[in-house]
Amino acid sequence: MTSPPTGNLAREFTESVRPPADVAAAVAWTLLTLLSVYLPVVNQTPLRVALGLPLVLFVPGYLLIAALFPRNDDLDWIERVALSFGLSIAVVPLIGLVLNYTPWGIRLDPILGALSLFVVSMAGLAAYRRLSLPDEERLTIPAVETLAAVRSELFAPGQSRLDRNLSILLVVSIVAALATTVFVVAVPKEGEHFTEFYILGADGKAADYPTAFDGGTPQWVTVGVSNHEYRDVAYTVETHAFNQTFDPATNTSTVDRTVLLDSYAVTIPHNQTDERRVNFTVPDTRFNKVEFLLFAGEVPAETVSGQARVNASSRDLHLWVRVR
């Protein structure tokens, strides 16, 4: 009795544990998407969107279908593709719904982590179920057969020059349509250019601001600046104490006293937000207003003060205060 050659055993073992090509491709696509999101340079390119859309709209459903129906005759490929899109649209919102009730919430990192975990889990289950079947029952990807059938249909032997040219035009049109769709999705038109400027109270909400306190006591708020200008912007945030009076006879307000309490500069990339705690101390009871000014780019000279400085700012916020 002779034992099988060692090379045959190694080949059989490798084939038995090698993941199916489509499952491996889905996992590889997920890894590429993660790299496109977290690599510093790549995540600013359209590649992030081009890889992310299939991960959200197709890959989860495809792997779930592959795990549920591992046999070649369970479903035809049209049904598999259609169900892959449909189940992906159902699975991803469910993942978001579950995350909404966790401490992580619905943010980019938790969603990508949960989606990647789902993909890897379904890929492992799909590979296990498919490799457990006999070779003749396993799902196979008829890529070669499909390409051959398409080629024979479009470029059949003996067709006229006109038919061949029309077939070439059809293929070019399909490729151009797909390329245009990918370009429109991956490179969307720029939206409105704007900057968000806001202040938050002690609980991180737009409430409970320090509006009544003793003069000379330290107070604080959280100041947030969000850049949606489609470019890096150098911002300067100033905090001033004003004494502003109103003359009912002329229906005008006058700033007769002002002092700079705090100032800082920050450069924010597009679609990023800077939030920080800003401390200020109103010196005495001669002031009744705390003004927060945002400047984008150049800051006016120190000689520009009071209401003129407010008018020169890009955004301004204020708190009416009662200083004891």
Image: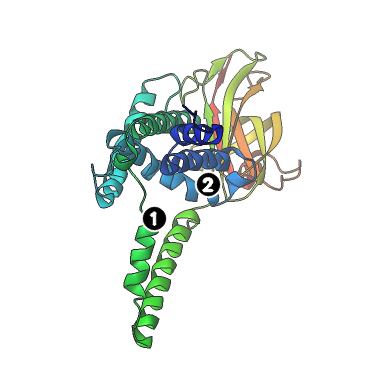
Q: In which quarter of the image is residue 178?
A: bottom left
Q: Is mark 1 in CB contact (under 8 Å) with mark 2?
A: no
> To which residue does mark 1 refer?
143
Q: Residue 309's x, y, as percent? A: 66, 42
Give me the residue at 24% from left, 44% from top.
Answer: 73
Q: Pick the residue in front: 97 or 216.
A: 97
Q: Pick the residue in front: 256 or 196.
A: 196
Relative side of 234 to 205, left or right? right
Q: Is residue 249 visible?
A: no
Q: State which quarter of the image contains the C terminus.
A: top right
Q: Quadrant of residue 262?
A: top right
10 Å crowding of disc 2: few (<14), some (14-19), many (20+): many
Q: In terms of sequence position, does the residue under pointer 1 or pointer 2 come before the other?
A: 2
Q: In this view, does 24 lie above or below 114?
A: below
> To which residue does mark 2 refer?
48
Relative side of 261 to 123, left or right? right
